[in-house]
Image (spheres, coloured by chain):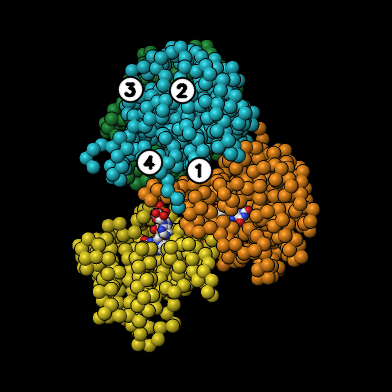
Chain colours: A cyan, B orange, C yellow, D green
Amino acid sequence: MTDTPDLSVELGFLRLKNPILAASGTFGCGLEFTPFIDLNELGGFVVKGLYFEPRSGNPPPRLVETAAGLINAIGLQGIGVKHFTETILPQLKDLQTAVLVNICGESEEEYVRVADYLNGHEGIAAYELNISCPNVREGGRCPAQNAESTYSLVRRVKQMSARPILTKLTPNVTDITLIARSAEEAGSDAVCLVNTFLAMAIDIHTRRPKLANIYGGLSGPAIKPIALRMVHQTAAVLSIPVIGMGGIMSAADVVEFLLAGASAVQVGTANFIQPDILPQIVEDLRRFLVKNNIKQITDLVGGIKSP
Amino acid sequence: MTDTPDLSVELGFLRLKNPILAASGTFGCGLEFTPFIDLNELGGFVVKGLYFEPRSGNPPPRLVETAAGLINAIGLQGIGVKHFTETILPQLKDLQTAVLVNICGESEEEYVRVADYLNGHEGIAAYELNISCPNVREGGRCPAQNAESTYSLVRRVKQMSARPILTKLTPNVTDITLIARSAEEAGSDAVCLVNTFLAMAIDIHTRRPKLANIYGGLSGPAIKPIALRMVHQTAAVLSIPVIGMGGIMSAADVVEFLLAGASAVQVGTANFIQPDILPQIVEDLRRFLVKNNIKQITDLVGGIKSP
Amino acid sequence: MLLDTKAEIVGRESWGDYFLLTIRSPSIAEKAVPGQFIMIRTASGPYPLLRRPFSIHDRKKDTIDIYFQIAGEGTALLAAKKQGDECDIIGPLGNGFLLDTLAEGRTVAAVGGGRGIAPLFFLGNELQKLGFPLTVYYGGLTSGDLPLEKKFRDKGIPVHCSTDDGSTGFHGLVTDLFLSFLPSSRPDHLFVCGPDPMMKALSRICLEERISAQFSLESIMGCGFGACWGCVHKIKTQGEAEWTKICQEGPVFFTEDIIWNND
Amino acid sequence: MLLDTKAEIVGRESWGDYFLLTIRSPSIAEKAVPGQFIMIRTASGPYPLLRRPFSIHDRKKDTIDIYFQIAGEGTALLAAKKQGDECDIIGPLGNGFLLDTLAEGRTVAAVGGGRGIAPLFFLGNELQKLGFPLTVYYGGLTSGDLPLEKKFRDKGIPVHCSTDDGSTGFHGLVTDLFLSFLPSSRPDHLFVCGPDPMMKALSRICLEERISAQFSLESIMGCGFGACWGCVHKIKTQGEAEWTKICQEGPVFFTEDIIWNND
Ligand SMILES: Cc1cc2nc3c(=O)[nH]c(=O)nc-3n(C[C@H](O)[C@H](O)[C@H](O)COP(=O)(O)OP(=O)(O)OC[C@H]3O[C@@H](n4cnc5c(N)ncnc54)[C@H](O)[C@@H]3O)c2cc1C
Ligand SMILES: Cc1cc2nc3c(=O)[nH]c(=O)nc-3n(C[C@H](O)[C@H](O)[C@H](O)COP(=O)(O)OP(=O)(O)OC[C@H]3O[C@@H](n4cnc5c(N)ncnc54)[C@H](O)[C@@H]3O)c2cc1C
Ligand SMILES: Cc1cc2nc3c(=O)[nH]c(=O)nc-3n(C[C@H](O)[C@H](O)[C@H](O)COP(=O)(O)O)c2cc1C
Ligand SMILES: Cc1cc2nc3c(=O)[nH]c(=O)nc-3n(C[C@H](O)[C@H](O)[C@H](O)COP(=O)(O)O)c2cc1C
Ligand code: FES
Ligand code: FES
């Protein structure tokens, strides 16, 4: 009981000091959080989605709050990969935590181009392929809604990538396990789920959508029960690690995801609300393990019992 | 301004005195609510899902509350169609409101059998085909996740039905418009959406699912933004009426669904929390119309403007 | 049953994480019988979403009391309510304890575990009026779980206490306390309310000892008035064991009808 | 910027649906400059989910004030807070008004619409210290929207009021009030905070009249510290018009850099 429990997780291709990662798009490039926390206390973080070129994103309003949820339609405004490697990456190089880059593209070629460019730079632990952003294409469609597009895209990037590939999946599908399997077969080293749920809200006085983009992606506690189910389904059929997310606000939420089969988790929207939440979750997890006499956090993974 | 606005809606096959219906499974057979409200103030109500035979449902726990949501795994416990026509239906016959019956089945044959049996009884305005319950089959699957099964089932029931058919769709699909189109092509008179989202929750202390059935269906305010988006997408491509639902808790929520294209709405979970909510919503809607000088509620339907 | 959306809280007491609220609602108070419950909305927004069920702990002319322990978010919000606040309630719900069948001269006892003591005060008072003096066995984890002991005594209702840690009264489970009294003062009829394991154990004892008994069951409730089918327990009805809505057919059932180990 | 999760509310005033809270947070108070804001968590649970932004209305040694109007659920919860309650805040955020560039002898004025008056009191006080007496134009729909008039006067800050319904002061829009004073007392520099249509109109006036001006913009904010990219407004930066995060690069911008009609 006096031993401090082991929080580290081995994903096979990457060892994390703890299973708590910050989710892409909710953590800027990490530096936004240094006034509040020590980034080295995290298992890692995923920087905001990057296209090859800078991108201007969607017009505002870009956010609307719903019951226990947030709909965003940022539209992946970003600085592009060159600017990132020149101005941001050097500032991250001394961190003792895993830095992952979320890669976006309008086409398979663009994903490859971004990965290729990043291959030539140090200080990145892995690529997270964002094939699931609902805010870019007409009607919220994305490659991760289709098993073939998923397979083809992941395979192409995997073949040229100098780094492990995590594929980020969308929950806006009939059967998440089919898409996850495609990603695994195409060589993905892990899958991350879920990205946001396509959603909308309407201002009844102006009769206009509350988002300029009409649709956006729903995140936050509202979606947790659906995300958890998808992680549970996916972990049951894959051999590669599943990284779970969706509405995590506490260590208890993290434990739920681990029990459902996630090897690690990402925390998104909660960072906006409580910018020091990540180290707090790590600390609360440690306490949970001590209290329940669990020696290593990996003992929780997939530990759900039958009802 | 002194005129009372016209709340009635004409669905083509059915005229409702107002667009507010109670959703199936959340309103019992209606009689449970007579201590609180006058059923005649409603546009109508849909009785709890009926199989041909009585059904014992899932073991408890059957409910778990989540952030702004409720997961249920009742498993369609019910009295069966004979008992219903013998003991319940006669009690409803003098109501001045539309009584709809939610029809379930383990197979196409069972849906047909239930409809056939009900054809022989008076006092039912229409059938709502529940092809979307996540709590019955292994892993939450249902016919409404597949365009072909939807088409085939709706077509068979439509051919023998003495009454209009509303098809109730599941949100657990990649593209709701494909399924909705199948229902329309098969002859459905309207579609109702959404049923619940497949979801789960885990007790971190016992490590067991919080529902004995492991998975259940998420309803309530948490799902509203996703449901609204699906109604908006569906109404844009169908010619038959769309009946919207998911998380409605107020007249403002109803107006959002109408603007998105719903011709009428159903209210589910809210009935548990506020058993007199339906007439209150009707009254609040009336006030909204008066205040905004809208003569008839149908003026709102599909009235969303571009951003 | 009635919906009273603006019932005023006119009294409040607390002991550690146990609370007692007195709520003004003349029409609900008038109809209430022991063993019935009310459903309270703990927040006006969507979180917590559902109402929460609480036994009616006491009833005066115009008011009802509830007595509860903080268990989560909903009860915490309720505990934060102050005198003068409004409270949105539905009640009285369920069937309550069956008292008409008690034959003259019969002795009655009740076992309450923790917050399960709540309905037994209303019950004790009514039984007193009917001429059946109730003996109460009151158990908790520790002495802080038994704040109502004196209240029962002051009302002339004898109470025997137990705590799991021995900090007050009998050292051990309330079921063992009850068993220890059985040889000397065996009741003809027993009323039980408490956590499931305690109720299961007492159920077995009552069946073995052929003591007729009524149990007030708990379950997560979606509505409280029979609409959601969420609150079922397996109950024998006319011989058949069926998932039965405890909000409507219960929450009080007789030992012989309750099937434990839901399967 | 700092996270202060247990800042105590040490003062509270209210006028209709306008409220003023005094919050003890020495470290945030120490750093604050006029035009900066704080983000407040209005509930501990998931509803409302996001923090809400409020301008710093006043600053004492150990405390900051916010002044707000009820707009929805979050502000209603905030209005219900009492003295002694804890409050979870982040601040000071954003860049505030640029004051160093004011040359000696320059005259300054400010226009505040409704709740937009909030940052102008802190601003007026600081400008007073710097030797620039501020004239304030204060507009609202009706007289109840102008509860701070006296407070400004008591501080020696001249205020001209307008109401849309004429119930107090100038009958009309605050922009028209400002225009009516323009010939006689034209400011060299203007500070503006209020609803978008008012700011747009003043922006046009300032450009036409060649009055340099700073505007405090509003937007729905996800985080308040640059992480979500939710709060953008189109702003000219080095000639290029770009969606710019107002929480980080603003909320205060100069007229010539702001592009209205987001497109
Ligand atoms: C008929 C009935 C009468 C009751 N009377 C009383 C009473 O007089 N005093 C009292 O303190 N409590 C009573 N309860 C239990 C009380 O309703 C729960 O403690 C309360 O609903 C918990 O709400 P919460 O939001 O604080 O906790 P939650 O966060 O909702 O839950 C905390 C824990 O309590 C469990 N729980 C939640 N709802 C219930 C429920 N309805 N029944 C049992 N466990 C539940 C959850 O599974 C969880 O483990 C009664 C329950 C029933 C069914
Ligand atoms: C930098 C900044 C400083 C502010 N300072 C003050 C202040 O000093 N005093 C004051 O009363 N208000 C101020 N506001 C506005 C205030 O933040 C909103 O009124 C508040 O967030 C509404 O929250 P709610 O939950 O009550 O309403 P909600 O229910 O969230 O919204 C009600 C209405 O307000 C709109 N709204 C929501 N959030 C914002 C927002 N962040 N900005 C503008 N409109 C919004 C919504 O679209 C909706 O129409 C400021 C806003 C910003 C961005
Ligand atoms: C404002 C915002 C921006 C986001 N941007 C990205 C992004 O750039 N790339 C990506 O893969 N996911 C993005 N996401 C999705 C999150 O990474 C995460 O998958 C989702 O929000 C669910 O987790 P949560 O409920 O903890 O927020 C974004 C989410 C939000 C709220
Ligand atoms: C307890 C419960 C039982 C339900 N039973 C049924 C049912 O029998 N048939 C059906 O079609 N839908 C059923 N539903 C789904 C609702 O009719 C509705 O589609 C869903 O709850 C979304 O609406 P809401 O968010 O307003 O509750 C049930 C929902 C709940 C919460
Ligand atoms: S609680 Fe809803 S049926 Fe019993
Ligand atoms: S509010 Fe999040 S970036 Fe400005």
Distance from Cα at disc 4 to Cα at disc 1: 17 Å
Image side of residue D41 versus residue B293, left or right: left
Callout 2 and callout 1 share a chain: yes
User: Can residue D177 be seen by looking at this rendering?
Assistant: no
Residue on which the image places disc 2: A164
Q: Chain of mark 1?
A: A
Q: Residue at x 28, y 37 (%)?
A: A5
Instruction: Looking at the image, tell me whether mark 4 or mark 1 is earlier in sequence order.
Output: 1
Could you tell me which secondary element the residue under label 4 belongs to?
Answer: helix
Circle 2 SS class:
loop
Mark 2 — on which chain does it sit?
Answer: A
What amino acid is labelled 3 in the image?
A: Gln
**Residue drawn where x is 38% and y is 14% of the image:** A90
Q: Do we see residue D188 in this rendering? A: yes
- The disc, 3 or 4, on the residue closer to the chain's N-terminal end is 3
Q: Which residue is more in the foreground, C183 or D69?
A: C183
Dot 3: few (<14), some (14–19), or many (≥20) neighbours within 10 Å?
A: some
Indicate which disc, 4 or 2, sits on the residue closer to the N terminus. 2
Q: CA distance from mark 3 to mark 4?
A: 25 Å
Q: Which residue is mark 1?
A: A229
CA–CA distance in space, label 2 to label 3: 18 Å
- The reply to the same-chain question for discs 3 and 1 is yes
Where is residue A50 drawn, in percent x and y?
Answer: 50, 20
Mark 2 or mark 1, which has the lower sequence index? 2
Query: The residue under label 1 is which amino acid type?
Result: Arg
Real-space CA distance between mark 3 and mark 1, rounded to the nearest whole angstrom: 33 Å
Disc sitting over residue A300 in the figure? 4
- Asked whether the beta carbons under mark 4 and mark 2 sit within 8 Å of each other, the answer is no
Comparing labels 3 and 4, the label whose residue is closer to the camera:
4
Disc 3 chain ID? A
